[in-house]
């Protein structure tokens, strides 16, 4: 069990209203060192908004967000993979330069060290052959891998991933799971996903966001944004089972 000194980021009764519509309300959450938090919920439920508030990219209408302990230090490294639709792919920048942006805060590195780290990261995400390609020429999956490279290149202490599997083929999905699994022992991870089945097995905490935060304590998960002890998910499983029986499946 985490002690108070392990707390990195604390949300206290956080809410945000946009265009007179409550996007999130009453959100209270402690993010502790070593956490792997899976965040699921319906579209429009406030998952991305929650991440942006945690990252201080959005200011909440109510409540407060505090960075504590090592997270309050200037050199606390954060990696962030936003949703692809937040990126202007027309911007004239190459794959390698985009990935290198994740090293902006690393003033301790020489040019040679930076180039070596970028090269290694490109190999890790399978884009070495596209290093000089403008991001506007990439497929959706290649752009997603580029943004993942930017998020992980600095070996962040906090890694925030918003739908990291979007646009990826099944082969690279498994590769992403491996990358995340390798980082998890020494990185605090927040990961938004619609498919909780695999991620929940990796995470130590699971939060469902539907304008409010709900903590999931189930050990069983279906291919759905909810867990099996949640009413809607349980109903979906019952319907699936009934349909299977009726059709002798």
Image (cartoon, rainbow, N blue to C red):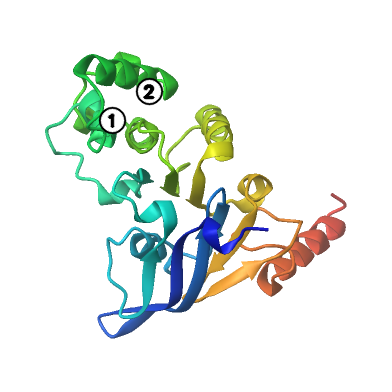
In this rendered view, identify the residue nearer to me: 74 or 148. Answer: 74
Image vertical order of residue 205 relative to residue 202, above or below: below
Residue 42: x, y in percent? 51, 66
* Numbered label attached to residue 121: 2
Q: Earlier in the sequence, mark 1 or mark 2?
A: 1
**Residue occupied by mark 1:** 99
- Residue pictured at 19% horizontal, 26% vertical: 94
Looking at the image, residue 20 sits to the left or right of residue 187; the answer is left
- Residue pictured at 15% horizontal, 31% vertical: 93
Other-residue count near label 1 (Cα within 10 Å), few / some / many at <14 / 14–19 / ≥20:
many
In this rendered view, identify the residue nearer to me: 116 or 44. Answer: 116
What secondary structure is marked by label 1? helix
- Picture quadrant of residue 9: bottom left
Image vertical order of residue 167 relative to residue 28, above or below: above
Image vertical order of residue 77 relative to residue 209, above or below: above
Disc 1, disc 2: CB below 8 Å?
Answer: yes
């Amino acid at each position: 069990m985490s002690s108070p000194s392990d707390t990195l980021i604390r949300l206290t009764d956080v809410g945000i209203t946009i265009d007179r519509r409550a996007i999130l309300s009453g959100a209270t959450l402690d993010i502790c060192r070593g956490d792997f938090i899976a965040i699921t919920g319906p579209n429009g439920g406030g998952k991305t908004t929650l991440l942006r508030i945690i990252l201080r990219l959005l200011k909440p209408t109510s409540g407060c967000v505090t960075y504590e302990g090592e997270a309050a230090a200037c050199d606390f490294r954060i990696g962030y993979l936003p949703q692809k639709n937040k990126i202007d792919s027309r911007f004239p920048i190459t794959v390698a330069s985009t990935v290198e942006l994740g090293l902006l805060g690393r003033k301790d590195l020489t040019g040679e060290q930076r180039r070596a780290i970028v090269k290694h990261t490109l190999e890790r995400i399978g884009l070495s052959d596209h290093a000089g390609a403008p991001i506007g020429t990439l497929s959706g999956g290649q752009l997603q891998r580029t943004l993942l490279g930017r998020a992980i290149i600095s070996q962040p202490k906090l890694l925030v991933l918003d739908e990291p599997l979007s646009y990826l083929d099944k082969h690279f999905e498994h590769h992403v799971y491996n990358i995340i699994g390798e980082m998890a022992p020494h990185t605090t991870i927040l990961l938004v996903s619609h498919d909780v089945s695999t991620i929940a097995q990796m995470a130590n905490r699971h939060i469902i966001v539907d304008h409010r935060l709900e903590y999931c304590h189930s050990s069983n998960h279906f291919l759905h944004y909810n867990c099996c002890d949640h009413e809607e998910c349980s109903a979906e499983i019952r319907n699936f089972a009934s349909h299977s029986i009726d059709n002798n499946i």
